[in-house]
Amino acid sequence: MIFNSLTFLVFFGIVLCLHMAPLSWRAKKLNLLVASYIFYAAWNPPFVALIWLSTLVDWFAAKWMNASDNPNRRRALMLVSLVTNLGLLGYFKYGGFLLENFVELLRMSGVSYRPPTSNIVLPVGISFYTFQTLSYTIDVYRRNLQPCKSFLDFALFVTFFPQLVAGPIVRASDFLPQCAEPRQANPRQLGWGFCLLAVGLFEKVVLADGILAPVADQVYDNATGVGFVDAWLGTIAFSGQIFCDFAGYSTCAIGAAMCLGFVLPDNFRFPYAAMGFSDFWRRWHISLSTWLRDYLYIPLGGNRHGRVRTNVNLMATMLIGGLWHGASWRFVVWGGLHGLYLVAERVARHFWSDAQWAQRRYGRVFLAAMTYLLVCVTWVFFRAPDFGAAWEVVTAMFTRPPGFPTQPFAIGSVGLVTACLLIGQWMLRDSSIEATADKLPSWARSLVLIAILVSLALVQEDDRAFIYFQF
């Protein structure tokens, strides 16, 4: 079940009506829990059992860890949680990848081995709910969080359907307190929640799928011999597509949760207006970047053990972050490039931290433009179907002479959307959509909303799944 489908609109309407009915708060939470299981089961019902297993293991592991003062027992229980969650993630997401690389190593050693056919199906959203429930047991282990007293509340935290399959990755400390008291959206929250749903669907359906995806697909699905203009056009189109697709999902998730009276954290803060790569990761997929910071980078030592160790920790974190996105060396390269960017940025700041030009308007614009263009280079490895296609596109971007584009009319549409996206994010980089909307007169907000709804009604939708569902 995806947000951009009639099925979801019917489903959400039923859930919302039940949530607003005169029922007890416990009954409403039970309705949300059952609805979340139905929402997930719409993809593949048997995989609901994996969520049940993670929920039960982490519920009891956290409860018993908190009750024990024995360090060895606590570490053993934490290890049970880690092995269960990461074991499931490793088997379903990385089993085929590890087997393929094992076979390749044997081949390089002169050993011919043909493994039995593997038909492992990746459970949708497993990377997201695994990280979410792991954050709970880790926080309890560190004694930063008391275990939840209500199993119903904890199960709802793990499976809350608006953000279950593609985030934001919510912390237990943010969500569980919201389950303590009855929550129901007031008229303002309900209206704003529906507006966010509309905005998110507009980003996904109209911009990502309707305008940008066909251009990116044309380039990356036919990358052999691609020209300079087409390579940049397809890559810039994908940079807009991936943002509008993923930010669109997060916006829909936040809006749906708000309609139910719950608050989810922002996952994007105008990342294409970032000035530098540390700034980019403070703005892009915030729930993942903060998770990697708190549960990987800082435990590795963070920046507490000198410059060299800090750079190593940054690289390790970004390489693992890349692998989190997909079981492919292309994603490792994508993460590695971001790690190199972050290390290079730290070196540059050491030598030019007091540069006056970087504080001026032209310097800030230059830094934002360079950040965006270098991020676009990393998107090549994220989007390309294989290394051969990625190399073709990168080679064309930097070595081939300009030629006549195969999609001349797409230059205008992609250019217009990209220009609006970059200028809009630059203007709003220190603000928020909510604050900007509050500054507009009511008639202007109404016109924008009407335009969004009309465009959604007119576009020919093919019900593409959100890109991050595969992670």
Image (cartoon, rainbow, N blue to C red):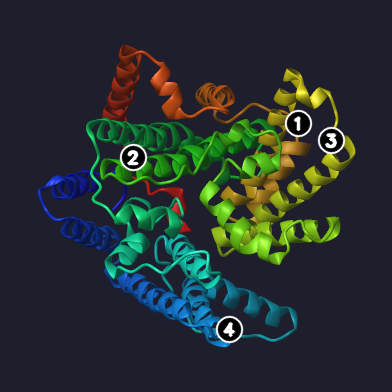
Q: Residue at x 18, y 50 (%)?
A: 15
- State the residue in front, 35 or 245: 35
Q: Residue at x 37, y 43 (%)?
A: 254
State which quadrant residue 197 falls in. top left
Using a 10 Å C-alpha cutoff, classify the residue at mark 4 as few (fewer than 14 neighbours), some (14 to 19) or many (20 or more). Answer: few
Circle 2 SS class: helix
- Residue 108, percent from left and from top: 74, 78
- Residue 37, percent from left and from top: 26, 63
Residue underneath mark 4: 71
Q: Earlier in the sequence, mark 3 or mark 4?
A: 4
**Amino acid at the residue labelled 1:** Pro
**Amino acid at the residue labelled 4:** Pro
Q: Earlier in the sequence, mark 4 or mark 2?
A: 4
- State the residue in front, 9 or 462: 9
Residue underneath mark 1: 401
Circle 3 SS class: loop
**Amino acid at the residue labelled 3:** Ser
User: What separation in Å lies between label 1 and label 2 (alpha carbons)?
Assistant: 46 Å
Foreground tag (1 vs 4): 4
Residue 61 makes an appearance in the image? yes
Foreground tag (1 vs 2): 2
**Amino acid at the residue labelled 2:** Gly
User: What separation in Å lies between label 4 and label 2 (alpha carbons)?
Assistant: 42 Å
Circle 1 SS class: loop
> Mark 2 and mark 1 in contact (Cβ < 8 Å)?
no
Residue underneath mark 3: 353
User: What separation in Å lies between label 3 and label 2 (alpha carbons)?
Assistant: 40 Å
Residue underneath mark 2: 255
Foreground tag (3 vs 2): 3
Q: Earlier in the sequence, mark 1 or mark 4?
A: 4
Foreground tag (4 vs 2): 4
